[in-house]
Image (tube, rainbow, N blue to C red):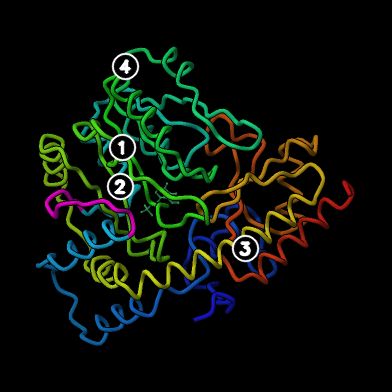
Amino acid sequence: MSFDTPIDRRGTHCVKWDMMEPIYGVDANDGIAMWVADMEFRPPQCVQDAVKAMHDHGVYGYFGDDSKYLAAIQWWMDTRHGWKIEPEWVFTTHGLVNGTAMCVDAFTAPGDGVVLFTPVYHAFAKVINAAGREVVECQLTNDGGRYEFDFDAYDAQMTGNERMVILCSPHNPGGRVWTKGELRAVAAFAKRHDLILVSDEIHHDLTFPGHRHTPMAHIDGIEDRLVMMTATTKTFNIAGSHSGNVIIEDPDLRRQFGARMAALGLSPNSFGLFMAEAAYSPEGAAWVDDLRAYLDGNRKAFDAGVNAIPGLASMPLEATYLAWVDFSGTGMSRDEFTQRVQQDAKIAVNHGPTFGTGGDDFLRFNFAAPRAQIDEAVARLAKAFGDLQ
Ligand SMILES: Cc1ncc(COP(=O)(O)O)c(C=O)c1O
């Protein structure tokens, strides 16, 4: 399979292409969708075959024995991340936005504070607010185009009302692969303030050369307050399967979480389980390695083109396929640079402010698409900001 092959997704009810006109006013006929974090690629053949086998069998009844699915998760976490887990630690939710919402529901009460390191994936704040909890924004420091924590400032911000902290690791949108030292500091912060630590590691497989993801579970002494979240969906581009794993080692936290899952009557979707079992395999692993190499080429092409435009700065990514571009150097208002990207270049992107404090000057571009599409996007941006050359 070639990642270069364009696939027309228009008219398939996909949010990325079919909702960009209603939401951003960018016509899908001549626009480019670079917002929602899914990819323009088919998953590996083994995943497509698993769906085809389900289709061919033709009976879509209740799912039962999940032992192979759990064994596949164990194998993947061990072989790809050096992380040994037990099957009984795994809860399967309807994706990780749902997993986040379940954590908020299980481990906090209305009015409690939930700490986020912003700017960060926008759905965290959405579910926290929707559940009647308070988002406590701890802003990351942008140190010359690289996000860093500032725990002295965060310590001073805490009021004692906080119950949970959610870490995005690797970080969306800044693309940081947090170092072991940084993860230790996050764990120490959680302990100091007696917080449950939820580590969303959905982007853990999508690192770039020279960067190795460390699971938060590798940090000593945090297991009694740690909730890990992983999924096949970003890695294999199967987000429509709405499936994610909340992995909890601590028996008390597990009981609490399991009780809420039971109270809400949640059980997994069989399509997601079959796809995950197929994906977490040697064939899936080889595909991911090819994907990462391709994404690395896209990252380089995108960054070279964008950084050549005076005033634009694409944050150097260590992981993810989501470029976080700083427009502050243009001296333009947010409305103006956004209008140039959307109306002139006809590119639909995610807007910085939705990621929380610190995101105002940024737009997020998804470059997980055939290289020709990335080249076209870069050419359009160069034209839209041509007066700055
Ligand atoms: C950090 C993070 N968590 C969760 C999600 C979405 O997870 P799901 O599709 O499983 O709900 C995304 C999607 O971009 C993400 O970036």
Q: Is residue 220 left or right of residue 358?
A: left
Give how far apart the Cα atoms at labels 2 and 4 are: 24 Å
Task: Quickly name the residue at label 1.
Answer: 198
Asked which quadrant contains residue 167, the reply is top left
The residue depicted at 78 percent of the width and 62 percent of the height is: 379
Residue range corresponding to the magenta coloring:
80-91
Q: Helix, strand, or loop for circle 2? A: strand
Task: Quickly name the residue at label 2.
Answer: 229
Between discs 1 and 4, the one toward the N terminus: 4
Q: Amino acid at mark 2?
A: Met
Give how far apart the Cα atoms at labels 1 and 4 are: 17 Å
The label number, if any, that marks residue 298 in the structure image:
3
Looking at the rendered image, the disc whose residue lies closer to the viewer, 3 or 4, is 3
Q: Amino acid at mark 4?
A: Asn
Q: Are marks 2 and 1 in contact (CB under 8 Å)?
A: yes
283 vs 171: above or below: below
Give how far apart the Cα atoms at labels 1 and 3 are: 31 Å
Q: Amino acid at mark 1?
A: Val
Task: Quickly name the residue at label 4.
Answer: 161
Q: Residues within 10 Å of mark 4 (few under 14, many from 20)?
A: some
Asked which quadrant contains residue 284, the reply is bottom left
Looking at the rendered image, the disc whose residue lies closer to the viewer, 3 or 2, is 3
Q: Residues within 10 Å of mark 2 (few under 14, many from 20)?
A: many
Label 2, ligand 1: CB separation under 8 Å: yes
Residue closer to the observer: 215 or 90: 215
